[in-house]
Each structure stands twice: as structure tokens, then as C-alpha cells.
Image (cartoon, rainbow, N blue to C red):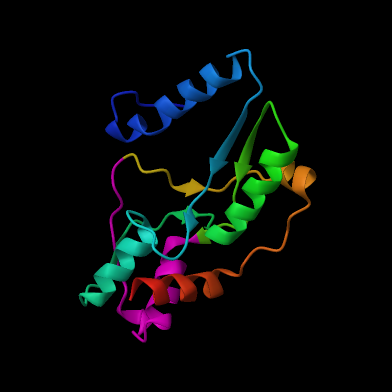
Amino acid sequence: MFNDITNPRWSYSIPKALGENLIANCGLDWLVLRYFNVYGPEQKDHFISEFVERVKQGEYYINGSDTRSFCYVNDAVFITHELVKNVSNKIINVGRQEETQIEDVAKCILDIMGVDPTKLKINKGPVGSVKRRCPDTKQLQELTMFNDYTPLRKGLAKTIEALR
């Protein structure tokens, strides 16, 4: 899983894995929720909010052409509530199984903001960046039966409105 322990990008996932191991072995009831690219109004320090800020400055670039799975914050909150009420002693991926190219998200943001999406420039991504991040949500679906995700364009429009 950690193929280059010297890469500083692994400093994010290694402590998470260690923490999950400690929690799962603590002797108490526990629940670990792994959130995948939750986005929404008022967010900070995330691809979507950072890209919106760049677009407002007239900068239309992204770094890398990876894929991610985006989950609107209201959906994540609903799912979390259902899981906390009804589940224990499990590690569950919280997100949407639909995988989207970052390039497509950026073009959608440009379009919503009234900028020609063909202006998007794609730079080389950071060394060691994960090329794709998409959760296996089979267990989530079995436990919650939730499948009424906010469409990406609708969630992006609400997020952009709040960030303007």
C-alpha cells in the first residue's frame, strides 16, 4: 500500500491507518468513517474551493488529471447520522462511488462561473499524488440503502454560490 515510504505525500495516509488500527483494538465500541472528497458551501483548503478562488483571479489551471469521487456535504451528513445511530465496530467508506476526472469538475466549475471551459490548462500533477480515489461503497449501501446523492453540477453550483 505504501510503495515509497520516503514520499512526503504519504504523511497523510500513514497516520490515518495507524489511528484506525488503534481504534479498532481499543476494546470499546467504535466506528471509523472514511470520507472521500466531501465538498460544499463554506469549505476551505480543498480542490474545489481553491480552484474557484483561482478562477475569480482569472487563473484557469489545475495540477494533474486525476480522478476523484465527490460527495456533497449534505449527503455526507445524512449518511453519517444514519451510520452513527445504527452501526458499530466497522470501518466504512463515506462517499459516492461515481468517479469523475478532475478536469471535468474544473470545466463544470468554469461553465457555472461563466468562463469558457476550453480556457482550462492542465499542468503536471504533484509527484506521488494518487491518480484515482474512488471508495468502495458496497458496505455503505448495504447498511444505509442511501442512493439519493446530490448531482455533482447541482452541488457545485451551491458551493460556488456560497464561495462568491
Q: Is residue 146 magenta?
A: no
Task: Judge whether 47 appears above or below 30 on screen.
Answer: below
Q: How far from the left and from the top, in percent, is residue 155?
A: 53, 70
Q: Is residue 72 visible?
A: no
Q: How far from the left and from the top, in percent, is residue 120?
A: 32, 74
In the shown orientation, is residue 106 left or right of residue 79?
A: left
Give the mark count.
Answer: 0
Q: Is residue 36 visible?
A: yes
At 58% from the left and 60% from the top, the residue drawn is: 74
In the shown orientation, is residue 21 left or right of residue 103?
A: right
At 70% from the left and 30% from the top, the residue drawn is: 88
Q: How far from the left and from the top, in percent, is residue 147?
A: 73, 59
Q: Which one is in front, 52 or 136?
A: 52
At 75% from the left and 38% from the top, the residue drawn is: 86
Q: Is residue 114 magenta?
A: yes
Task: Judge whether 114 appears above or below 86 on screen.
Answer: below
Q: How far from the left and from the top, in percent, is residue 85?
A: 71, 40
Magenta range is: 101-127
Locate the C terminus and report the quarter of the image it occupies: bottom left
Q: Indicate the quadrant where residue 152 lies.
A: bottom right
